[in-house]
Amino acid sequence: MKFRILLWLLGRMLSKASKNNPELQKQLEGKELGFTLLTMDGKVARSFRVAGQRISSCSGTLDAPAFTMGFRDAAYAHQVMTAKNKQLAFMQGIQDKNITIKGDAALVMWFQGLFKYIMPTKKKPKN
């Protein structure tokens, strides 16, 4: 359940940021694609679409995604996606075959780069 909520929240945050953040819109420029994050058993799946400098998401899978990222199970996926060092967790998961990637691996790296646009920023203290 945590992974399902995390994916839904990720979709909402990416959608909002794609409407309001000019830096993210620049990253989305010229991209027209879809991708899916799911558990390997297919019980939890969420798809994301990039079109017109906007990101939208829906539950389920796409017919022809640019890439699919599959996780061993929902608990493991939640653990990886909330890890302090996400890059290390992803790389370890791929190496251990707990995460599978089908499709364009370069787009997976591009997708991971979008996280910096949705992470809350710490406000600088006033002196």
Image (tube, grey):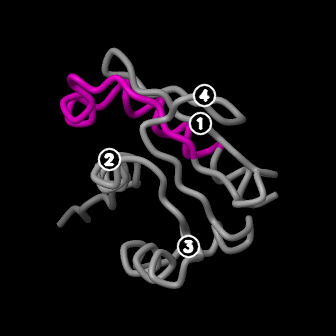
Q: Nearer the viewer, mark 4 or mark 2?
A: 4
Q: Position of residue 100 (x, y in %)?
A: 53, 64
User: Which residue is rendered at x = 71% and y = 35% of the image?
Assistant: 60
| Foreground pick, 66 / 3 | 66
Q: Residues within 10 Å of mark 1 (few under 14, many from 20)?
A: many
Q: Which numbered marker is on residue 63?
A: 4
Q: Which numbered marker is on residue 80?
A: 3
User: Which residue is rendered at x = 46% and y = 37% of the image?
Assistant: 14
Alpha carbon of mark 3 to alpha carbon of mark 1: how far? 18 Å
**Of callouts 2 and 3, the N-terminal one:** 3
Which element is circle 2 on?
A: helix
Q: Position of residue 13 (x, y in %)?
A: 50, 40
User: Which residue is rendered at x = 42% and y = 37% of the image?
Assistant: 66
Q: Is residue 117 above or below residue 56?
A: below
Which element is circle 1 on?
A: strand
Q: What amino acid is labelled 3 in the image?
A: Val
Alpha carbon of mark 1 to alpha carbon of mark 4: how far? 10 Å
Relative to 57, 87 lies left or right: left
**Of callouts 1 and 4, the N-terminal one:** 1
Q: Position of residue 114 (x, y in %)?
A: 33, 48
Alpha carbon of mark 2 to alpha carbon of mark 3: how far? 18 Å
Query: Circle 1 sits on which residue?
Result: 47
User: Which residue is rendered at x = 40% and y = 77% of the image?
Assistant: 91
Query: Which residue is farthest top?
Result: 52
Quadrant position of the N terminus in the picture: bottom right
Tell me where the magenta segment starts and ends, as one range. 8-36
Query: Circle 2 sits on which residue?
Result: 107
Q: What amino acid is labelled 4 in the image?
A: Asp
Q: Nearer the viewer, mark 3 or mark 1?
A: 1
Q: Nearer the viewer, mark 1 or mark 4?
A: 4
Count how many numbered circles sit on residues in the image.
4
